[in-house]
Image (cartoon, rainbow, N blue to C red):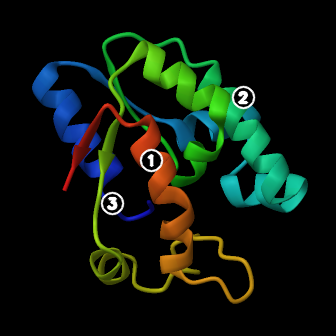
Amino acid sequence: MPGAGKSTVGVVLAKVLGYRFLDSDLEIQEQTGKLLYELIEEYGDEGFLRLENQVNAGLTVRRSVIATGGSAVYGKEAMEHLRDISTVVYLRLSCESLKERLGDLHRRGVVLKPGQTLQDLMDIRCPLYETYAHVVID
C-alpha cells in the first residue's frame, strides 16, 4: 500500500545487506522517459498497470532490494516473477496508520475510483499482498 514504508525500509535494508536498492516506479520512469502520472494520463489506469507488470516481470537484478509501487500486486506475471527471484515482503499497516501517513490521498498520487475509499482499496489489495508475500511484517 502507498505509505507503508516500502522505500524507507528498502533503502535501510539494502544498506544493511550491502545490496543495491531499486524502486520499480523509478525504473518504469527511466525506461519510458515519462513520469508516472504522465503514463497514467496517456495510457489510462489499465494501460499503466500493463506497463508496470511488463517492467516488473522483466527485472533481472541480483543482490538487490526492490520496492514496487503499491499497484504492482495487480500484475500476476510480475508478482510470480518476483516470488521466483526474491523474497517478497509485505509491510502490513492498519488503514488508520496509512491515513495518518498519507494525509491528502490525491496529493500523494493515490488513484481512487469515484466513491472509493482507502479501506476499499485495502480490501482489494491486501489479500493479493498476502497471497504473494513470503514474509508479512506487521
The type of residue carrying mark 1 is: Tyr
Q: Which residue, as the protein is rendered here, is positioned at the far bottom?
A: 115
**Amino acid carrying mark 2 in the image:** Gln
- Tell me the number on the disc at residue 54: 2
Q: Does any portion of residue 30 appear in the rendered image?
A: no
| Front position in the image: 84 or 70 | 84
Can you tell which mark lies on residue 4?
3
- Labels 1 and 2 touching (C-beta < 8 A): no
Q: Secondary structure at mark 3?
A: loop
Secondary element under disc 1, as helix, strand or loop, is helix
Q: Quadrant of residue 32?
A: top right
**Residue type at mark 3?**
Ala
- The answer to whether 49 appears left or right of 1 in the picture is right
For numbered disc 2, what is the local secondary structure?
helix
Q: Quadrant of residue 90?
A: top left
- Residue 99 picture quarter: bottom left
Label 1 CA crowd tier, 10 Å (few <14, some 14–19, many 20+): many
Q: Which mark is residue 20?
A: none
Position in image of residue 62 (x %, y %): 38, 10
Q: Quadrant of the C terminus?
A: bottom left
| N-term mark: 3 or 2 | 3
Q: Residue at x 65, y 71 (%)?
A: 111
Up-down relation of residue 115 to residue 39 (above or below): below
For the point 48% across and 41% down, the residue is 68
Farthest residue, direction left: 16
Locate residue 78, reporting x and y percent: 61, 28
In three-dimensional space, the C-alpha distance between marks 1 and 2, rounded to whole angstroms, equals 18 Å
Spatial CA span between label 3 and label 1: 12 Å
Quadrant holding the N terminus: bottom left
Which residue is under mark 1? 129
